[in-house]
Image (cartoon, rainbow, N blue to C red):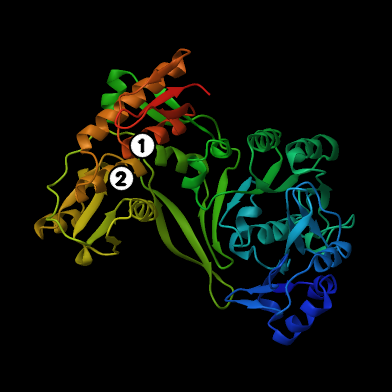
Amino acid sequence: MQKVITDELDALLEALPPHIVEPLQQLGRRDKLLEVVMDLGRLPEARYIDQEVALSQREVTQEDLDYVSSHIGAFSDDNRAGIERTLHRISAIRNREGKIVGLTCRVGRAVYGTIRIIEDLIRTGKSLLLLGRPGVGKTTMLREVARVLADEMKKRVIIVDTSNEIAGDGDIPHPAIGHARRMQVPTPRMQHAVMIEAVENHMPEVIVIDEIGTELEAVAARTIAERGVQLVGTAHGNTLENLMMNPTLCDLIGGIQTVTLGDEEARRRGTQKSVLERKAPPTFSMLVEIQSWEKVALHSDVAVVVDAILRGQASPAEVRSLDEKGEVKVEEKANHVLAPPSWEAAPRKAPPPDGKLRRLYPFGISRSRLLDVVRDMQLPAEVVDSLREADVLITSKNYYRKRPPSLRAAESSGVPVYVLRSNTQTQLEQCLSELYGIESSPHAVTSALQEAEEAIREVMTHEGAVELAPQNAYVRRLQHRLAERYHVTSQSTGREPYRRVRIFKG
């Protein structure tokens, strides 16, 4: 199907004050308008895809805000309102007394034909989770999924519509959802209860849910999947890696637990005795990372992918895109690598001579994570795409053992190779600290984290708290992250230079 967009923009313009509507109409570019922002005492703004434009030299008054409020639906507990039979969303900012002092009027558009790129997945009957950054089109795609399943596949579809974003405001749902039925949620805190109610009362074959964001909602999603109902939903996070690191939502992909191996099994695997493993079957058997309306990365078997990632193995994600003719193209395989937390020091080559800027080439290492670490540590570094540009190559122990041509070429050309035991943020921070000669030696960091890991095991087994040895701020931050990963509480106590981390059950 060719992509068709409807926006009912005139309905939104009718809800805005006339002195704001007139310049909007003069600007044109209706198809590029994202939202209109009105803050008390400031100039009203129109936000387009590529720019922001002041709509008037007259500041927004309380009368302007009241005018909009009187022309739209009622605000719910999450400070969102809509316009009946449209997909527009108006969000309020309130002062301490609860009075509205700002409004964000977002244009809602129904886009037909957006799921061609993943339509074969929808038709399998398996549960599917959509991830992506805010504004990338998750809800738009979810709406179209509901329509296709209800109209074209003739399935009984129930939409759990928390903020009326999927099916619009008012009692009559927007026609963009086709024959799918919609259940509105009285307050966001009750979303999980309405999800269960939908299954128990209305015998759906498919449930569609937007923004799964709490532990109760994750549990409700698992309950739905276990009853044999196809679940299609969205969750916070850009990638599968984000979901695995989110203790609240990782149950959606099976959950992660710490397992202690026997000595023989640990030697056989070549790992530490404490490893991470998937706890249960995933709630969603398939996962799609939405990069844009025309490009996605998909994992067709989440269980296999998560298991591979936890073992530190590369897991291919199929990248699909739509060409100019609307045909689906498989462009490449993108490797996702996320090893379990392990901080045993690995042998490394000597660091390069001191210099201001170092060009880092990640091989089998998450590029995005390396960029995040470089930015967080404020290092003079550039992450490059080829060995020819590199001053340093960073790889994982798993890749180094295989001795691929790129590593052999780096060593033969004199490019230093840093080998990490695992592809984690902590190992990258440790590596770059050594490379740039800052704060702590790798041995000291390793010892501090091993001490924290032992303390975590103790508080997980017994009641009480354990205080660690004093460390600098950098090492304490790593210890806090380790505690967070194992779902225990940590806090810093004492004064420098004796400030230390205390670990206990929260």
**Which residue has dot 1 on it?**
478
Give the percent coordinates (x, y) of residue 391: 18, 60
Q: Is residue 444 left or right of residue 490?
A: left
Q: CA distance from mark 2 to mark 1?
A: 9 Å
**Which residue has dot 2 on it?**
429
Give the percent coordinates (x, y) of residue 265: 31, 23
- The residue lying toward the viewer, choosing from 97 and 394, is 97
Classify residue 500 by image quadrant. top left
Q: Residue furthest bottom?
A: 26
- The residue lying toward the viewer, choosing from 386 and 103, is 103
> How crowded is the residue under tag 2: few (<14 C-alpha within 10 Å), some, or many (20+)?
some
In the depicted structure, whether residue 459 falls above or below residue 76: above
Q: Is residue 65 left or right of residue 145?
A: right
Give the percent coordinates (x, y) of residue 345: 22, 35
Circles 2 and 1, Cβ within 8 Å, touching? The answer is yes
Query: Which amino acid, by three-letter code, is at mark 2?
Result: Glu
